[in-house]
Amino acid sequence: MTPEARMDRLERIAKLFVRAGLRQRQNLRRLDEKIAILINAQIRSEDQMVELNEKAKMLFDAQMRNEERFAKTDERFAREDERFAREDERAAKADERFAKLELQTDQTLKILTEMVKQRRNNGDS
């Protein structure tokens, strides 16, 4: 092989190495871009996760406040039920007293009408 042929061969091999190197650099750049895209997506995902955790905490806190309010409302309803039960008992006792009074009034009226009848009968005779 002549020195010129060797030189041509070396040039071809050098060109192949250069092209392979350029291809490798392009592949590395593409990989770097893809890795950067993945990293950015991961960062966004983590940010969204933090935001979702904050919102979940807010919802949990709101739920706890609602539970406390519901418990207080249940207590109020229980007190009102007790109060209404006492009022119902009072009303029942008042109804009993009224019934006794009505019975006494009826008896008194009966006696009074009999007395009036007797006076008339005694006055007529």
Image: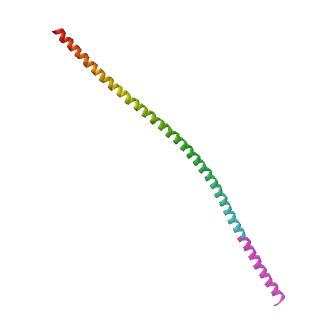
Could you tell me residue 64's position as x and y percent? 56, 45
Could you tell me residue 42's position as x and y percent? 66, 60
**Which residue is located at x 60 percent, y 49 percent?**
57
Could you tell me residue 58's position as x and y percent? 60, 47
The quadrant of the rendering that contains the N terminus is bottom right
Q: Is residue 36 left or right of residue 89?
A: right
**Which residue is located at x 75 percent, y 79 percent?**
16
Task: From the viewer's side, name the closer residue of 74 and 40.
Answer: 74
Q: Quadrant of residue 13?
A: bottom right
Task: From the viewer's side, name the closer residue of 122 and 66.
Answer: 122
- Provide the residue span drawn in magenta: 1-27
**Which residue is located at x 31 percent, y 23 percent?**
102
The vertical placement of 63 against 93, above or below, is below
The vertical placement of 19 against 41, above or below, is below
> Hey, which residue is sitting farthest left in the picture?
125
Could you tell me residue 32's position as x and y percent? 71, 66
